[in-house]
Amino acid sequence: MFQSMAVICAAAGVIYLFVPHDDTADPIKPVDYRVELLTAQRAAPYPVVAPEGLPGEWTPTSVSYKRRSGDAWHLGFLTPERQYVAVEQSTAAPAKYIARVTHEAADTGKTRQVGGRAWQHFEGSKYDALVLRENGVTTVVTGTASADRLAEMAAALETGKPSPAASPAAPAAPVSSAFPAPAASAGL
């Protein structure tokens, strides 16, 4: 048994020495979310948002669109300080959806003006969030980042609809307008 263990350890040592590895490399791999954004913009029943004009130090790390889960759009980023910020949108019931994506953060009763809109401020033990409910869709900017970084992300969010001539292989359509104006009768 001792000899078998010695052979296994020697083989592992040889593999470790000859397989290239870089201990200083960043383990976070940025994702390209353009295709998923285009797909979500075409499929979602609401204007899908994504940040436009964020500094290059913001790293996109995750993206998804789940039609069967309330048309849920998710886009995750790391800030320059390596804190997490996510953009979440859905047509699901707002109370349950907000609780799920913010890890049970609670409404503080305060609002923060960002981009001409009053976002509700939520605080929690894990994530804080800014929440905007209008026109049947809930938009949440949440994460471990500071309130200022959450507001920076919220301010950068813009919508765009893909052009009819866009092909699936083409990059995402350029963002052409800010959030649509809230409907006067939207009492969400």
Image (cartoon, helix red, strand yellow):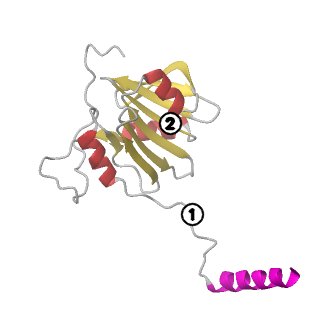
The picture places residue 49, in percent across and down from the top left corner, at 33, 39
User: What whole-number distance in Å separates the C-alpha atoms at marks 2 and 1?
Assistant: 23 Å
Task: Tell me what residue is drawn at x 61 percent, y 82 percent.
Answer: 19
State the extent of the magenta-drawn residues as a range.
1-18
The picture places residue 142, in percent across and down from the top left corner, at 50, 36
Q: In this view, does 42 lie to the left or right of 36?
A: left
Q: How crowded is mark 1: few (under 14 residues within 10 Å), some or many (20 or more)?
A: few
SS of the residue under disc 2: strand
Task: Tell me what residue is drawn at x 56 percent, y 20 percent.
Answer: 108
Q: Is residue 126 left or right of residue 50?
A: right
Q: Quadrant location of residue 90?
A: top left
Residue occupied by mark 1 = 27
Most extreme residue toward the left is: 165
Q: Which of 21 and 118 is in front in this view?
A: 21
The kind of residue on which mark 1 rests is Pro
Q: Which of 106 and 11 is in front in this view?
A: 11
The picture places residue 131, in percent across and down from the top left corner, at 45, 28
* Count of picture labels: 2
Q: Residues within 10 Å of mark 2 (few under 14, many from 20)?
A: many
Question: In which quadrant will I find the C terminus?
Answer: top left
Most extreme residue toward the front is: 1
The numbered dot on residue 70 is none
Q: Is residue 146 magenta?
A: no
Tell me the chief SS of the magenta region: helix
The numbered dot on residue 142 is 2
